[in-house]
Image (tube, helix red, strand yellow):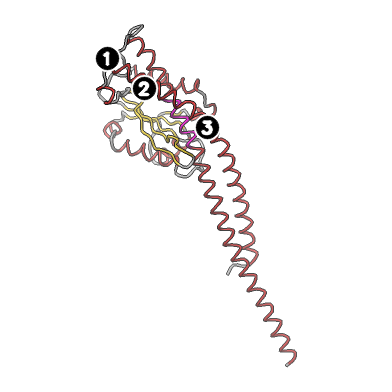
């Protein structure tokens, strides 16, 4: 059995760790509230914009009149993998990267083998994990988290739209954790470009009078919709990150508390055994003197 000094040292160490994880949990909870508010405010707007765009597109065929809706042969692919810049949030980052790798070796294996697949990371952890696994990251926008605003996200979206329209990529995919609640994140894969039109809306007949023309309205709405989609994905991931970290730190704090209980019980047993041995030695010594 370990001596009392070693057990006391371990108890002190675990208590210190519990104090740190508890503080990190509270910080994550505070950040989560702000991030969740941002998601709650943006999501209805983003959903409605997407719905309007789909309805207008369904009123007439715009797939050939707009570069962002025109589907072409998938020769060049860009994967945008969104994670966090920091760790200590459980499997949050690993799950996103794992999904990205499954797309690389699965759906887009031909493009990857021919050198026509590039990876853009938003979040330092994705870049670190991918490089450790031997995958090349073309570029990153990890500093987007330093000032997570729509203006900064718009710059990234504008660059992606420009690259797509110039033919640098034929398909751009988004992979991120969508925020559901503090304890749950939905791993999401979305097609960023070209814009997909749902089959349901294709079957619905919409009778609209367009002013100005349908083409002008669609050409104006699509860039705004894409900018909103990218910003929504990043703030969703940001909120999900804080939720995952809060949950992970809560579990770590609970585990530390359980370990302290076990160590305290071990300490008390060792101390009791030590006292018993001392009493036996005193009694044996007294008997020897009396004998």
Q: Look at discs 2 and 3 and give the one toward the viewer.
A: 2
Label whose residue precedes the other's in the sequence (3 or 1): 3
Q: Is residue 236 magenta?
A: yes
Residue to which mark 3 is pinned: 35
- Taking the view exactly as shown, the residue that stands out farthest to the bottom is 291
Q: Residue 60 — which label?
A: 1
Which one is in front, 202 or 151? 202
Label 2 residue SS: helix
In x, y percent, where is residue 217?
36, 11
Q: Categorize mark 1 by other alpha carbons within 10 Å: few (<14), some (14-19), many (20+).
A: some
- Is mark 2 in CB contact (under 8 Å) with mark 1? no
**Nearer mark to the viewer, of 3 and 1:** 1
Residue at image location 51% in from the left, 44% down from the top: 247
Where residue 163 appears, as percent x and y from the top left, is 37, 19
Q: Residues within 10 Å of mark 2 (few under 14, many from 20)?
A: few
Residue 132 visible in rendering: yes
Q: Which residue is mark 2?
A: 51
Give the side of residue 74 with respect to residue 176, left or right. left
- Which residue is outermost to the top? 212
* Residue 234 shown left or right of residue 22 in the figure: left
| Magenta highlight range | 229-240
- Asked if one can make out residue 118 in the rendered structure from this viewpoint, the answer is no
Query: Alpha-carbon distance for marks 2 and 3?
Result: 24 Å
Helix, strand or loop: magenta stretch? helix
Picture quadrant where residue 256 is located: bottom right
């Amino acid at each position: 059995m370990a001596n009392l000094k070693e057990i006391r040292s371990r108890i002190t160490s675990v208590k210190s760790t519990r104090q740190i994880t508890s503080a990190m949990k509270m910080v994550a909870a505070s950040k989560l509230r702000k991030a969740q508010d941002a998601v709650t405010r943006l999501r209805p707007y983003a959903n409605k914009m997407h719905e309007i765009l789909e309805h207008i597109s369904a009123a007439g065929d715009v797939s050939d009149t707009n570069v962002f809706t025109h589907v072409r042969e998938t020769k060049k692919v860009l994967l945008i993998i969104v994670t966090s810049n920091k760790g200590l949030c459980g499997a949050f980052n690993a799950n996103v990267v794992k999904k990205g790798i499954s797309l690389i070796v699965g759906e887009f294996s031909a493009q990857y083998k021919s050198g026509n697949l590039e990876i853009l990371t938003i979040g330092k952890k994705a870049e670190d994990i991918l490089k450790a696994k031997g995958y090349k990251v073309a570029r990153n926008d990890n500093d987007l988290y330093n000032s997570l605003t729509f203006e900064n996200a718009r710059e990234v979206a504008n660059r992606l739209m420009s690259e797509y329209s110039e033919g640098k990529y034929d398909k751009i995919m988004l992979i991120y954790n969508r925020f559901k609640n503090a304890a749950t994140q939905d791993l999401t894969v979305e097609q960023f470009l070209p814009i997909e039109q749902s089959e349901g809306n294709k079957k619905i007949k919409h009778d609209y009078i367009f002013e100005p023309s349908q083409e002008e309205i669609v050409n104006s709405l699509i860039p705004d919709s894409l900018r909103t989609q990218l910003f929504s994905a990043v703030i969703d991931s940001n909120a999900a990150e804080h939720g995952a970290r809060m949950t992970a730190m809560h579990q770590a704090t609970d585990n530390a508390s359980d370990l302290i209980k076990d160590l305290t019980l071990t300490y008390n047993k060792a101390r009791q055994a030590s006292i018993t041995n001392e009493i036996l030695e005193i009694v044996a010594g007294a008997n020897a003197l009396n004998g």
